[in-house]
Image (cartoon, rainbow, N blue to C red):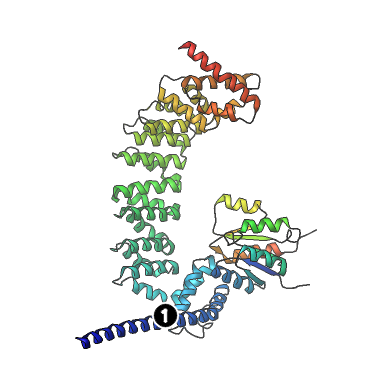
């Protein structure tokens, strides 16, 4: 069994991806990065992440589509997903939760807040 | 002659060869430089980010005590890239590195550059650094000759200057460039309630479009403490200012100001009457219903339209008044009432009750008949053809020709 939690960061902006990767590494998580929606789904299948941090606007498949696929596949249904997006309109946030996101963080984001949310979602849940 | 020609050809060839060589060398130089910068970025970025995530007092130990001249643009790009993407502690730490490594000093010097684009970039980067000591320099940049510099200085002040920047930004609303005024108004509106006092204080000294922008900002911030002051603006000699004040009062939702807005419905200028009507709708002021009904007979379309919309916003009592306006003697008021009832979905809701029994059907029948009498049957015909309930379609199909036929008999 893996001790270090593995987080998949789906983000097409390399600067943000590096920042989030470095931040989560710093807090003891193993990070894998996908730079588009298709790549994110492929990595979700191959690398079995414990949590996914996903942008909404990405090439090939956007974050909503990634979420839809994740939530419709029993293999991924239990993986917590945090949306990390510049879209701060109420309807975007509501749509994110409706598609199955567990949390929604708006960019520019507070790094420590993101870590706290990730940590909370990775806490072992009761029966 | 031939020798001269050969010389000329050789000269042109030499010049072209030299230019080609220069271009190729320049491109090679840039590519080598970019490749080096990418390598250095890969090496330096983790160090900068580790500092941002950590709690070390200085970044210098992590960078080996300093940054070489060749690495400075790389570190600067890393800092500027990341500082825009985060908030909170890490943003502050990255901003402080810009100061610690001397970039802020360079930007301050850049504000005095004879080239406007250097000054504009310097102002923007100072905003990203959020260095408090840049505030007086950015304040001076608000008077720069170049519009881009003034605007970026205003944005930087909003980001870096805190409340100290509010007064000069408010004064900058009088800036001659209208587009800049709009952008500065956006910046001030984004700063929220702390700008209210300064806006009110600086208001008498602003240009007319600056005053309009200030009133607009108050309408966007919704500060209840500005309502009494806004009420006084309804007596301003300039109609545009009165109109904007009425709009702001409505946007704030100050129910205590309903009385002054009702009075403003009698203003001699139509923009004021239109904004007063809109405001009364936002306040859901039922006392204003008779006045709004009267305003639906106004000679100006905007006043009629806003009054109809205000009645709709007021709720059931306003809707009932709108239905009553279908029997009004004024043709414009009748048409406006039809438009609002249609766009509010009231006509559809009533029509859906046609197959029912009792008061719902009577009200539906009455409304359809009055729409027909006013001559507004386009939507009714559409519903008769497309309504999802076949019973409603049948009822309308029977009702429309019959009612129209009855009208013909009356005529």
Q: Residue at x 60, y 65 (%)?
A: A36
Q: Which residue carries the number 1 mark?
A: B27
Where is residue A27? Give x, y as percent.
Answer: 64, 72
The quadrant holding residue B113 is: bottom left
B311 over B71 or under it: above or below: above
Left or right for B397, reference B254 = right
Q: Residue at x 31, y 65 (%)?
A: B140
Given the image, what chain letter belongs to the residue carrying mark 1? B
Disc 1 on helix, strand or loop? Answer: helix
Residue B328 in view in this figure: yes
Where is residue B30? Give x, y as percent.
Answer: 43, 80
Residue closest to the far right: A127
Where is residue A116? Give x, y as percent.
Answer: 64, 64
Q: Residue at x 54, y 52 (%)?
A: A89
Q: Nearer the viewer, residue A2 or B335?
A: B335
Question: Quarter holding the C terminus of chain B?
Answer: top left
């Amino acid at each position: 069994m893996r001790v270090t939690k593995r987080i998949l960061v789906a983000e097409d902006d390399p600067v943000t991806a590096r920042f989030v990767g470095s931040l989560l590494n710093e807090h003891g998580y193993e990070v894998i990065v996908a730079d588009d929606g298709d790549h994110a789904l492929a990595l979700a299948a191959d690398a079995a992440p414990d949590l996914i941090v996903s942008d909404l606007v990405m090439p090939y498949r956007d974050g909503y589509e990634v979420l839809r696929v994740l939530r419709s596949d029993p293999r991924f249904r239990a993986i917590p997903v945090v949306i990390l997006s510049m879209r701060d309109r109420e309807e975007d946030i509501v749509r994110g939760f409706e598609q199955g996101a567990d949390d929604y963080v708006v960019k520019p984001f507070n790094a420590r807040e993101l870590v706290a949310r990730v940590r909370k979602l990775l806490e072992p849940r009761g029966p | 002659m031939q020798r001269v020609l050969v010389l000329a050809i050789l000269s042109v060839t030499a010049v072209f060869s030299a230019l080609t060589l220069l271009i190729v060398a320049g491109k090679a130089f840039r590519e080598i430089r970019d490749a080096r910068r990418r390598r250095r970025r890969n090496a330096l970025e983790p160090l900068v980010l580790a500092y941002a995530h950590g709690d070390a007092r200085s970044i210098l130990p992590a960078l080996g005590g300093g940054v070489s001249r060749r690495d400075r643009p790389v570190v600067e790009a890393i800092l500027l890239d990341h500082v825009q993407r985060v908030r909170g502690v890490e943003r502050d730490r990255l901003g402080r590195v810009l100061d610690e490594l001397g970039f802020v000093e360079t930007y301050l010097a850049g504000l005095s550059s004879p080239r406007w684009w250097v000054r504009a970039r310097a102002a923007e980067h100072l905003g990203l650094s959020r260095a408090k000591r840049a505030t007086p320099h950015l304040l001076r940049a608000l008077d720069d000759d170049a519009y881009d510099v003034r605007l970026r200085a205003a944005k930087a002040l909003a980001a870096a200057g805190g409340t100290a920047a509010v007064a000069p930004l408010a004064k900058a609303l009088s800036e001659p460039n209208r587009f800049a005024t709009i952008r500065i108004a956006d910046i001030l509106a984004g700063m929220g309630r702390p700008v209210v006092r300064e806006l009110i204080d600086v208001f008498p000294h602003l240009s007319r479009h600056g005053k309009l922008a200030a009133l607009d900002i108050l309408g966007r911030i919704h500060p209840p403490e500005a309502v009494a002051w806004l009420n006084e603006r309804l007596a301003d000699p300039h109609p545009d200012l009165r109109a904007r004040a009425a709009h702001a009062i409505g946007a704030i939702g100050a129910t205590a100001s309903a009385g002054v807005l009702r009075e403003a419905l009698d203003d001699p200028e139509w923009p004021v009457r239109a904004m007063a009507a809109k405001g009364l709708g936002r306040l859901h002021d039922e006392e204003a219903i008779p006045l709004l009904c009267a305003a639906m007979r106004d000679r100006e379309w905007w006043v009629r339209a806003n009054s109809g919309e205000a009645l709709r916003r007021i709720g059931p009592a306003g809707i009932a008044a709108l239905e009553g306006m279908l029997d009004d003697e004024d043709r414009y008021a009748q048409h406006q009432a039809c438009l609002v009832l249609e766009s509010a979905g009231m006509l559809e809701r009533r029509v859906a009750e046609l197959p029912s029994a009792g008061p719902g059907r009577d009200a539906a029948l009455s409304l359809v008949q009055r729409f027909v009498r006013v001559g507004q049957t386009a939507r009714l015909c559409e519903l008769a053809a497309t309504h999802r309930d076949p019973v409603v379609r049948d009822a309308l199909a029977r009702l429309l020709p019959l009612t129209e036929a009855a009208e013909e008999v009356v005529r």
